[in-house]
Amino acid sequence: MRQLFPLLFVVLLLVGIQEAQAQPTPMTITSTYQEDADQLIEAALDDSAAFERLAYLADTFGARFSGTENLERAIEWILTEMEADGLDNVHGEEVMVPQWVRGEESLTMLEPQPNNDMQILGLGGSIGTPEEGITAEVLVVSSFEDLEARKEEAPGKIVLYNVPFTSYGRTVEYRTNGANEAAAVGAVASLVRSVGPASLYTPHTGVMRYAEGVRQIPHAAVTVEDAMMMQRMQDRGQTIRVRLYMEAEMLPDVPSHNVVAEVVGSEQPEEVVVLGGHIDSWDVGQGAMDDAGGCVAAWEAVRLLKELGLQPRRTVRVVMWTNEENGLRGGNAYRDAHMDELDDHVLAMESDSGVFKPNGFGFTGSPEAYAIVQEIGKLLERIESGTITKGGGGADIGPIMREGVPGMGLSVDGSKYFWYHHTNADTMDKLDPHEFNLAVATMAVMAYVVADLPEKLPRATEESSN
Ligand SMILES: [Zn+2]
């Protein structure tokens, strides 16, 4: 169809955008691309090989934490498979990544419930305890304000933030900054109620950071159940004494790799639509939904173009960024390595919100581009994944978005993601093959059409005049 692309399209589209931004652009995107989109959707939904490939990756290599052999073995396997798929320019791009090692860790209650071994997960970046551990009373607080109000009680204690999940963005503050605030009022360690809305006694790990100039203290997550129990104990006036033991330490940086593969464009190969996820995970579970699923869905979207012979005008590039979880080194290294190509990056797309039923994309870019991607969304209405909302992107594409590249993140049903996020329960059995295939179809159609449009997706007026 696109060989017969009518010149009228361009004219209508430009007129439509300039004169009636609020109105839908003419129907030409849908009429031009419906057949190709349907072909991609049907091929994606008909497939089980990609989901099986995802399961193989998750089961064979397991958690893919930065600095581990698991991660590098997974990356090598993916590169080999991408070659076998016949993708273009398959290669790894070296990135130095941090190597935080968890080691053994434990939290034992001494009173009021002696010898109660509680499940914990040390938070990424935390220091360990001395060899004998830290034995201290626990002070439970409900917020930073509550800690401030009770700061006289804090010296020498282990502060526990018992903060119920509201949104990830709000609650995660206690995981990232909790140690700094606790250290500032004299605590010897800090604990955080796991960041999740529901729990079956599952601690959640994640990254934490030490502020400059603040004394560093160990920081770990307890389960929702234990946080609530210790709250009840404190409320009834019981003294809570625990021993925290953590071997965590930061070792020197080691090399890892961003995975890159392409379907090279037929007319403007230097112009690129990039899509992907992050190949690293935390050191627990399988990182199946965070973010092996996003990576393999993007990979499959690109592989389908190859298989169906749908070569767009521009290059479509799948990237699996490394070290998103505890460093973002992959996303930053990609920006640095491709800095002089970023003007030709037409769109960056990321899937990193779990593998659940997709409903569309969140988009960050010019109003003109927003109107166009909304129009492309109509091609996805038949699988209910064509809703484009304003604002969106992803951690790994953040660095290139800040250089002006339009970005979008796959939006999915988020109701269960934080049940599993950064836990031992992020495993393949939680994923639904049909929902995964819908993600493949959604990314494939959007990436393909943006890469094939007669005109580059317009950036904000100031930048496009540069
Ligand atoms: Zn992720």
Image (cartoon, helix red, strand yellow):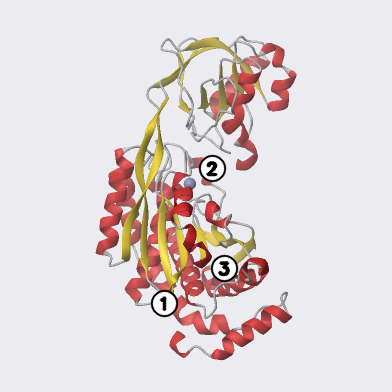
Tell me the distance, in whole angstroms, between the alpha carbons under discs 3 and 2. 24 Å
Quadrant in which residue 375 is drawn: bottom right
Query: In the rendered view of the protein, which quadrant contains the C terminus?
Result: bottom right
Residue 355 visible? The answer is no
Q: Which of disc 2 and disc 3 is earlier in sequence?
A: 3
Classed neighbour count for the residue bearing mark 3: other residues with Cα under 10 Å, few (<14), some (14–19), many (≥20): many
Between 418 and 309, the residue placed more toward the observer is: 309
Q: Residue at x 57, y 68 (%)?
A: 386
Residue 300: percent from left, percent from top = 37, 63
Between 138 and 311, the residue placed more toward the observer is: 311
Whether ligand 1 has any atom under 8 Å from the Cβ at mark 2 is answered as no
Tell me the distance, in whole angstroms, between the alpha carbons under discs 1 and 3. 16 Å
Q: Are marks 2 and 1 in contact (CB under 8 Å)?
A: no
Query: In the rendered view of the protein, which quadrant contains the N terminus?
Result: bottom left
Q: Are marks 1 and 3 in contact (CB under 8 Å)?
A: no
Classed neighbour count for the residue bearing mark 2: other residues with Cα under 10 Å, few (<14), some (14–19), many (≥20): many
SS for dot 2: helix
The residue under label 2 is 418
Label 1 sits on what residue type? Gln
Q: Is residue 28 above or below residue 114?
A: below
The residue under label 1 is 39
Figure label count:
3
Label 3 sits on what residue type? Gly
Between 211 and 285, the residue placed more toward the observer is: 211
The residue under label 3 is 386
Q: Is residue 307 above or below residue 31?
A: above
Q: Which of disc 3 and disc 1 is earlier in sequence?
A: 1
Locate residue 346 relative to residue 74 in the image: left or right. right
Residue 41: percent from left, percent from top = 44, 71
Label 2 sits on what residue type? Phe
Classed neighbour count for the residue bearing mark 1: other residues with Cα under 10 Å, few (<14), some (14–19), many (≥20): some
Tell me the distance, in whole angstroms, between the alpha carbons under discs 2 and 1. 34 Å
